[in-house]
Image: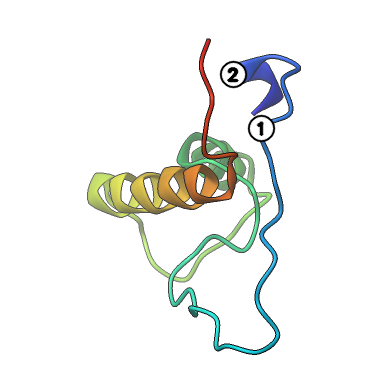
Amino acid sequence: MKSTFGGISLFQARSWSKEGEGVHECIRPTLPITADMIIKMLQTGELIIPIKFTRKHFAIYQMIFKRFIASQMKENFSY
């Protein structure tokens, strides 16, 4: 994110109410890596997966990744 948005601090960890139930994120990345990073890790053997991913797999992952990262950013930001 730093290379994309510069040194601006956009990440703001969410805090959840102790009284109420929070929303459960059923699908989200477990590591902050993009689809391009996953492709490189697969090519170098750093990451091994049991199935062959198609372009659709990577496109869906990238969509989920971007939405997750956006959900963690501050709400108001302007350049």
- From this view, report whether residue 12 is shown above or below residue 50: above
Name the residue carrying label 1.
Answer: 10
Name the residue carrying label 2.
Answer: 4
Disc assigned to residue 23: none
Q: Secondary structure at mark 2?
A: helix
Q: Is 1 in front, or is 20? A: 20
Residue at the outermost left position: 56
Label 1 amino acid? Answer: Leu
- The location of residue 14, given as percent across then percent down, is 66, 59
- From this view, report whether residue 9 is shown above or below residue 22: above
Mark 1 residue crowding within 10 angstroms, few (<14) / some (14–19) / many (20+):
some
Q: Secondary structure at mark 1?
A: loop
Q: Is 61 in front, or is 28? A: 28
Q: Residue at x 51, y 65 (%)?
A: 49
Q: Is residue 37 left or right of residue 13?
A: left
- The location of residue 57, given as percent across then percent down, is 31, 54
- The location of residue 3, given as percent across then percent down, is 67, 18
Residue 13: name its quadrant: bottom right
Q: Residue at x 66, y 73 (%)?
A: 16
Label 2 amino acid? Answer: Thr
In the picture, which quadrant includes the N terminus?
A: top right
Residue 38: name its quadrant: top right
Q: Earlier in the sequence, mark 2 or mark 1?
A: 2
Q: Is residue 79 left or right of residue 3?
A: left
Residue at the outermost front position: 19
Q: Residue at x 55, y 81 (%)?
A: 22
Q: Residue at x 70, y 46 (%)?
A: 12
